[in-house]
Amino acid sequence: MNLVMALLGAVLLYKLQEYLYRKLWNKGLNVDLSFSKDAAIEGEELSLIETISNRKLLPLPVLQVKFMTSRTFNFRDMDNSVVSDNFYRSEMTSVMMYQTLTKALTFECTKRGYYTIERMEIICSDLFMTKEHVDTFDINIHLYVYPKPIETTRLEATFSKMLGSVISKRYIIEDPFEFRNVREYQSYDGMKSINWKASAKTDMLKVNVFDYTSSQNVIILINTESETIWKYDDLNEESIRIAASLSREFIRQGIPVSIYTNAKDLITKEAIEVPAGSGSNHFQSIQESLARIDLGLEPKPFLPIMHKCLMDTTVNSHVIILSHYQKEDLQQLMLAQRRVKREFSWIVPINQHVRVSVSEELSGHIIEWNIVL
């Protein structure tokens, strides 16, 4: 009789806990993921913060958390992971009643990009581990991984050469709204610049002197097309890093920078354009746009983009082309720019397979950039 009662009690207990877990296991359960920062740089270490909160009397003895991230995230602890096209992470834990657990998963951002984690799957077992209950949590978090800056020693000579060209043509237009002072009239001064009030006071002709407005800016054009069927992502990634580093240096000098590329945005699937601007917020926009370049998408033809960009700007703008593509059509367009006296620099990233091969007339504008592995 005692045995029967014990068995009956066990069955009732099993059924009760089965019912409770089926109805209540995910009540008061909150699971969250967040990155320790919204943005990082290639090679930087971040943490993925996992927080589990169980706000109820029912304990969760076996709780499994599953989510998918990019395979470019190099986690220190790879024991609970499967790597294929993506990185699949599975965490097993126990959460008691009214308990909150927080765990930091450290990883290295090995590649530039824009990464999202949209959802996570939660699997809970009952006390006897005979039934599993599954739920999905939408989290929608994202991380920008910005291009790694080029080493200062490598960039310095290239930047200094370009900066000299930009500065030499920078101050060329007087701004009538930026009054500076008055000076004596010179034979080359126009009548409209005479300050008649100041002239009357001194019995000498005086003219207004204005500050100058900067009409010079820098346009960076990134071409990710290849000359052959072979794609050189290493060269394109280096072009993106150079563009980011040059943008930073010009903006530090107060020089407006715009970015145009035939590479497509991971989100919009359109070619990326960042209009001219300066300041820290503008540089952040450039960084985010470059991070979202998806080299897996087929780029748009580069020449129409470049031609339109050149037509929409004055010859006072300094143009920087980043392209390992060196076919005749691009060279002819650059020769045309040389004839109209436009200042430009063509940075050609090279490796063991790609070398510089351009017309002798363009050699003075070419900067050969050997990538460092």
Image (tube, grey):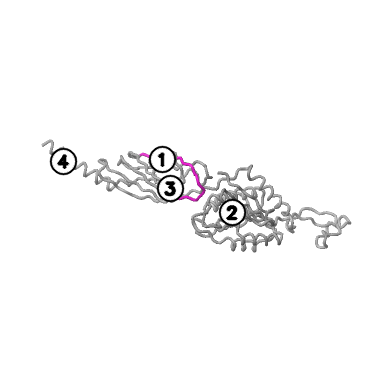
Task: Give the residue type at disc 4.
Answer: Leu
**280 in the magenta segment:** no
- Disc 3 marks which residue? 69
Could you tell which of marks 3 and 4 lies nearer the N-terminus? 4
Tell me which amino acid carries mark 2: His
The image's mark for residue 8 is 4
Q: Earlier in the sequence, mark 1 or mark 2?
A: 1
Find out whether the residues at labels 1 and 3 contact each other: C-beta distance under 8 Å.
Answer: no
In-image side of 252 versus 113 (left or right)? right
Q: Are marks 2 and 3 in contact (CB under 8 Å)?
A: no
Front disc: 1 or 2: 2
Give the extent of the magenta segment.
Answer: 99-116
Secondary structure type for disc 4: helix
The residue identified by callout 1 is 78
Q: How far apart are the alpha carbons under marks 2 and 4?
A: 78 Å
- The x and y percentages for residue 205 are 86, 58
Spatial CA span between label 1 and label 2:
37 Å
Q: Main secondary structure of the magenta part?
A: strand
Element class at badge 3: strand
First in sequence: mark 4 or mark 1? 4
User: Secondary structure beneath disc 1?
Assistant: loop
**Residue 12 shown left or right of residue 110 in the figure:** left
Q: Which residue is mark 2?
A: 324
Q: Quadrant of the N terminus?
A: top left
Task: Find the distance from the CA under tag 3 to the CA under tag 4.
Answer: 47 Å
Residue at image coords 35%, 39%: 93
Locate residue 82 relative to residue 276 in the image: left or right: left
Q: Closer to the N terminus: mark 2 or mark 4?
A: 4
Given this view, does label 1 or label 3 mark the residue nearer the observer?
A: 1
